[in-house]
Structure formats: C-alpha cells, structure tokens
Image: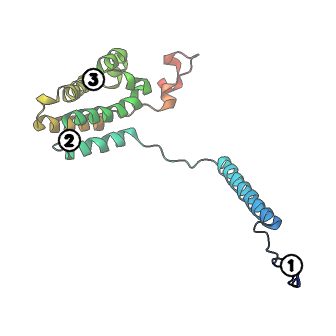
C-alpha cells in the first residue's frame, strides 16, 4: 500500500465454532465398562461350565462296534482296497480283543499276542477258537502285506468268518468275578461254591 492511503478499519475475526471432542471422557468410560462386563460374563460362564459335571455318554460296546464295521466291510468288500480291507478287519477284531485281554494287547503283533496270552486264549476261547483267531489274523496280514495276490473271492469269506468269530466270542467275565479275595483259597471262595 501506498503511504497516502488511509488504513481500513480492522475488525475482529470471529473464532471458529467449538467442535465437540470425538472421544470424550464419557465415551471412554462407557466402552471400558462394557468391556469389563463382557470379560466378567465370559469368565463367569467358563467357571460355571467347568463346575458342572460332564454329560455322561453311554460307553459303546466294542462287540457292537466291531460287528458294525465288519458288516460294512462285508457289504463293500469289492470296492475297498485289499490293504485297507485287511487293516480295517484287524482293527475291528482288536476292538473285541482289547475288551477281552486288555489295552496292552493292541500293541502286539499276532505272534506276540498268541505267545503272551496263550493261557488266557486257551481258557477263554478253547483251542479251536484260538486257531480260528490265528487264521483270521494271518489272512488279514496276507491282505495287508501282500495285496497283489488278493482276489475279491478271498475277502468275502474273511469278512464272514470274522463276523462269526466276533458273534460267537463268549462275553468277558464281569469285574466282580475276575477279582478274588487274596486271603481265601480258590476252593473256599463263595463264588466258587
């Protein structure tokens, strides 16, 4: 500006309008309170569920499970690979054997199983049924380890023989019959009378 020109009147500038703070204190308190309520409710729910007794599911009968699997194998023996057929047949038989001879019997090969449980097998199955079991396990091993010599005609009789074996296997004795008093001789035990 030139020196001769008069200075215009200066007016005050109006300040900008006050805008509310986007995250006010009350909002932080509300979010924190909601989060605390959520965590508290979640903790209470977990504690409540852990103190409730678990729902009891009925124990599955190993014999029924084995028979179901063997009947499935019998109906689908043509479409199942020989190795899988032999493996599933042995698994079904081992369900019943584990119930009868304990869980440790699952880790044995057939030869080890027959060596370790020879006395129990003779008493529980008899010599004929023990031979049937050995024959079943040998035939399953042939399918599992030599599947190239398999024919469909060999699988159906194997499934039928396994079903018959499981069906005719005597029930294991009740736990009360297996436990005898160590102080009484066998002939003086009340259950022996």
- Give residue 120's quadrant in the image: top left
Residue, disc 2: 80
Q: Tell me which numbered mark, 1 or 2, is placed earlier along the sequence.
A: 1
Query: Which residue is more in the foreground, 60 or 35?
Result: 35
Residue 17 screen position, x and y as percent: 81, 78
Tell me the element at label 3.
helix
Residue 48 screen position, x and y as percent: 69, 52
- Give the residue drawn at x 40%, y 26%: 101
- Give residue 144's quadrant in the image: top left
Viewer-nearest of discs 1 and 2: 1
Viewer-nearest of discs 2 and 3: 2
- Name the mark on residue 3: 1
- Give the residue drawn at x 56%, y 17%: 184
Q: Residues within 10 Å of mark 2 (few under 14, many from 20)?
A: some
- Name the mark on residue 130: 3
Q: CA distance from mark 1 to mark 2?
A: 108 Å
Disc 1 + disc 3, Cβ < 8 Å: no
| Quarter in which the N terminus is drawn | bottom right
Report whether residue 24 is seen: yes
- Give the residue drawn at x 38%, y 26%: 106
Query: Which residue is more in the foreground, 49 or 54?
Result: 49
């Amino acid at each position: 500006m030139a020196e001769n020109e008069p200075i215009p009147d200066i007016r005050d500038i109006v300040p900008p309008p006050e805008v509310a703070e986007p995250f006010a204190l009350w909002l932080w308190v509300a979010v924190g309170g909601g989060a605390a309520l959520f965590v508290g409710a979640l903790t209470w729910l977990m504690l409540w569920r852990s103190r409730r007794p678990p729902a009891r599911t009925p124990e599955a009968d190993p014999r029924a499970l084995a028979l179901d699997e063997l009947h499935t194998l019998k109906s689908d023996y043509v479409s199942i690979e020989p190795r899988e057929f032999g493996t599933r047949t042995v698994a079904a038989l081992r369900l019943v054997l584990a119930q009868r001879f304990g869980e440790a019997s699952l880790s044995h090969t057939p030869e080890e199983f027959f060596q370790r449980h020879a006395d129990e097998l003779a008493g529980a199955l008899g010599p004929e049924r023990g031979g049937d079991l050995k024959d079943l396990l040998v035939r399953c091993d042939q399918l599992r380890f030599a599947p190239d010599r398999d024919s469909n005609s060999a699988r159906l009789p194997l499934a039928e023989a396994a079903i018959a074996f499981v069906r005719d296997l005597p029930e294991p004795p009740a736990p009360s019959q297996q436990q005898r008093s160590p102080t009484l001789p066998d002939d003086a035990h009340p259950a022996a009378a």
